[in-house]
Image (cartoon, rainbow, N blue to C red):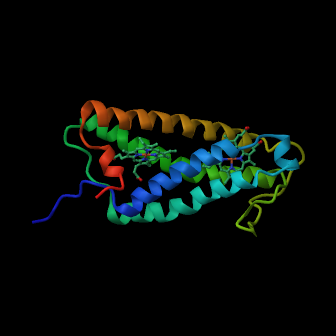
Amino acid sequence: MEVPVTRYPRALVVLHWLVALLIVAAWFTGEGGRSVRVNPPVLHFAFGLSVLALVVPRLAIRLVRGAPALPETMSPLMKAAAKLGHGVFYLFMIGLPLSGWYAASRMGVPVSILGYTLPNLTSAVQGPAGLIGDLHEKGGTIILILAGLHVLIALWHHFVLRDGLLKRMSFSA
Ligand code: HEM
Ligand code: HEM
């Protein structure tokens, strides 16, 4: 008899927690405006680019192995909201690093990771990065707020609904 999948594959669990840490680290190491040109936040670039690099295998595993079905106790509306929310996170995990990389290129700041300098995404301009930089900065704050909401929802499932949702994303067997 086929056993129903009730938890995320281990690889996705590892990637989930690693990427969560990287996003928080990218947020704390972010710099805005002038100081980016004077003293490029190399750690910020490295953390953010790691998010971009890891989202590729993460999406691939997610598409091939799928996510476990959500608890039957959740209403169709809540299930749809959860899927939408997770999809929004994926968009941010791709859009944020790319917009940051683009903003850095506009500022003429070379972007490197582990000693490798990446190509510029656009030509440099005088002055601030403009709209793309603003969108990136706002996006960086929005993803952190969404992550906070996501944590509250996870805790709600764990302590109030007690439907074992947190266990689906835990390392234990
Ligand atoms: C998940 C990944 C990322 C998050 C959460 C994030 C978050 C942020 C935040 C919150 C700021 C504003 C900091 C402040 O004003 O004090 C910022 C600025 C910036 N970030 Fe990121 N970032 C990410 C990835 C990247 C990447 C990969 C790059 C470049 C390769 C990058 C380049 C920049 C640049 C150039 C700015 C300054 C923009 C400006 O002043 O117009 N970021 N980032
Ligand atoms: C920046 C931080 C975070 C991001 C971007 C994030 C993103 C995601 C995404 C996209 C999923 C869907 C699964 C997937 O497709 O990989 C997910 C699931 C999950 N996350 Fe997070 N997460 C973050 C932090 C946290 C934290 C701190 C907790 C702890 C309470 C948490 C608890 C969970 C749980 C329990 C699930 C499983 C939900 C389910 O069963 O469908 N996440 N997260």
Q: Quadrant of residue 112?
A: bottom right
In the rendered image, the vertical position of residue 37 relative to residue 4, given as above or below: above
Which residue in the rendered view is the most extreme toward the top? 160
Is residue 81 toward the left or the right of residue 129 in the image? left
At horizontal 81% and vertical 52% (from top left) the residue drawn is 40
What is the x, y in percent for residue 59? 45, 60
Q: Front-most of 35 and 82? A: 35
In the rendered image, the vertical position of residue 44 relative to residue 82, given as above or below: below
Q: Front-most of 30 and 119? A: 30
Q: Quadrant of residue 116?
A: bottom right
Is residue 117 toward the left or the right of residue 23 in the image? right
What is the x, y in percent for residue 78? 30, 35
Which residue in the rendered view is the most extreme toward the front? 172
Is residue 123 toward the left or the right of residue 93 in the image? right
At horizontal 77% and vertical 40% (from top left) the residue drawn is 32
In the rendered image, which quarter contains the C terminus?
bottom left
In the rendered image, the vertical position of residue 71 relative to residue 60, given as above or below: above
What is the x, y in percent for residue 54? 53, 61
Q: Quadrant of residue 150?
A: top left
Count of picture labels: 0
Q: Front-most of 171 and 30? A: 171
What is the x, y in percent for residue 60? 43, 65
At horizontal 68% and vertical 39% (from top left) the residue drawn is 137
At horizontal 40% and vertical 63% (from top left) the residue drawn is 11
In the rendered image, which quarter contains the N terminus?
bottom left
